[in-house]
Image (cartoon, rainbow, N blue to C red):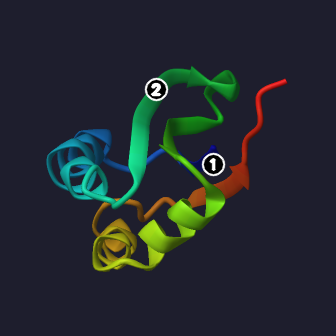
Amino acid sequence: MAKLIAMYRHPADPVAFDKHYFNVHVPLATQLPGLTGYEVNRGEVSGGQWYLVAILTFDSYEAMTAAQQSDIGKAALADLEHFAAAGLEVISFDSQPV
């Protein structure tokens, strides 16, 4: 299993961020090929350091990489400029249960 974690900084306009994120970005990202899970975490994320953290799950790192390089992946990346002006950090990794 592989995970991509997108950690969004606090936006200047949370209402506009939420509107675009949930009405445009999520519907786009849920079309990523090979996506097996998508969860959003809000509220007190790391003591309030982040506004929103999204966790996307794929069967493998290769599947995640292919999804990012797909047309949908490129469109989702390009969409960030429309709502994530405050910035974000993204980490991705293979995940193995212990």
Crowding at label 2, few (<14), some or many (≥20) Cα neighbours within 10 Å? few
Task: Residue 42: give its label.
Answer: 2
Q: Residue at x 73, y 41 (%)?
A: 95
- Under mark 1, the amino acid is Ala
Quadrant in the rendering for residue 40: top left
Label 1: state its secondary structure. strand
In the picture, measured across the screen, residue 72 lies left or right of residue 93, that is: left
Q: How many marks?
A: 2
* Gap between marks 2 and 1 measured at Cα: 22 Å
Q: Residue at x 72, y 53 (%)?
A: 93
Crowding at label 1, few (<14), some or many (≥20) Cα neighbours within 10 Å? many
Q: Is residue 94 above or below residue 95?
A: below
Q: Residue at x 37, y 71 (%)?
A: 73
Q: Please report contact status of discs 2 and 1: CB closer than 8 Å, yes or no.
A: no
Q: Which residue is mark 1?
A: 2
Label 2: state its secondary structure. strand
**Residue 49 coordinates in the image, percent (x, y):** 65, 35
> In which quadrant of the rendered image does the N terminus lie?
top right
Looking at the picture, tell me which residue is in the foreground, 63 or 48.
63
- Under mark 2, the amino acid is Arg
Q: Is residue 3 above or below residue 70?
A: above
Task: Residue 39: give its label.
Answer: none
> In which quadrant of the rendered image does the C terminus lie?
top right
